[in-house]
Image: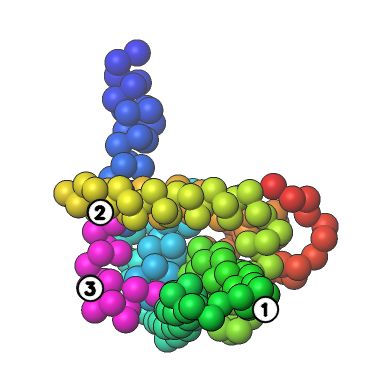
Amino acid sequence: MNKGFFSADGKFYKVGTVLGDMLFAGVLWIFFSIPLVTIGAATAGVYYACTKKVSGRDEYFFKDFFKGFKSNFVKATLAFLILAAITVVIGVNIGIMNDSDTAGLLDIPVFVAQYFVLIQSVFVAVYVFAILARFELSLIAALKSAMIIANKHLFTTIANVAMLTLTIVASLLFPVLILFIVGAYIYLSSMMFVKIFRKQYPDFDKPLDQTLKPLNFGSDDESED
């Protein structure tokens, strides 16, 4: 029994492998995000490697990461800059309006619209880098697909936003654990994303070395979470 437990097919080995992948994902993401502008590309890279791992493709993690990082560098970087700009502009504008003494009832629709765009930007940010990593799409199509998926699978989206928030808070409170905390979020969210991708694309796990072209993410043939 003990031999089986500690063997290559045992639970101890499998759990240790997953924990090691989480740590490695965190290390790669932190290191390649240091220039800040590369955060989008680094995120796409770790999602490419992690979603392949979750799909059961036991390949070289760093090789997969670097492939996802390099092949999606431009689109993922642009996606990050666009989403970051939207978040900053709306955040600053909301702050200015909150501090304004002239704010009244007429400003309520503006507040609602801005908060809606801000929330949608967060929703899109949760999915878009994983989509860019695994599907052959233009940047506009990837952003659109991310918005459709985020609102269609709202429970998964909210769960991911909650996990991301906890990841940020935990990383600030326990910076010594930041590598594992970040990697754990990426790996766990990859498990959720792969489940969604499999629903939308039945052959998601079959191709080994090519980027996939997705089905219509906006179709109604799949049920909500």
Residue at 57% in and 52% down = 158
Q: Secondary structure at mark 2?
A: helix
Name the one closer to the observer, 21 or 1: 21
Determine which of the numbered discs, if any, sits on residue 41 in the image: none
- Tell me the crowding category of disc 2: few under 14, some 14 to 19, or many 20 or more residues within 10 angstroms, Cα based: few
Between disc 2 and disc 1, whose residue precedes?
Answer: 1
**Residue located beneath label 2 in the image:** 172
The type of residue carrying mark 2 is Leu
Where is residue 183 drawn, in percent x and y? 33, 53
Q: Image quarter for residue 35?
A: bottom left
Where is residue 8 drawn, in percent x and y? 33, 33
Name the one closer to the observer, 211 or 163: 163
- Residue depth check, mark 3 versus mark 2: number of the one nearer the observer: 2
- Residue depth check, mark 1 versus mark 3: number of the one nearer the observer: 1
Name the one closer to the observer, 103 or 208: 103
Mostly what secondary structure, the magenta segment? helix
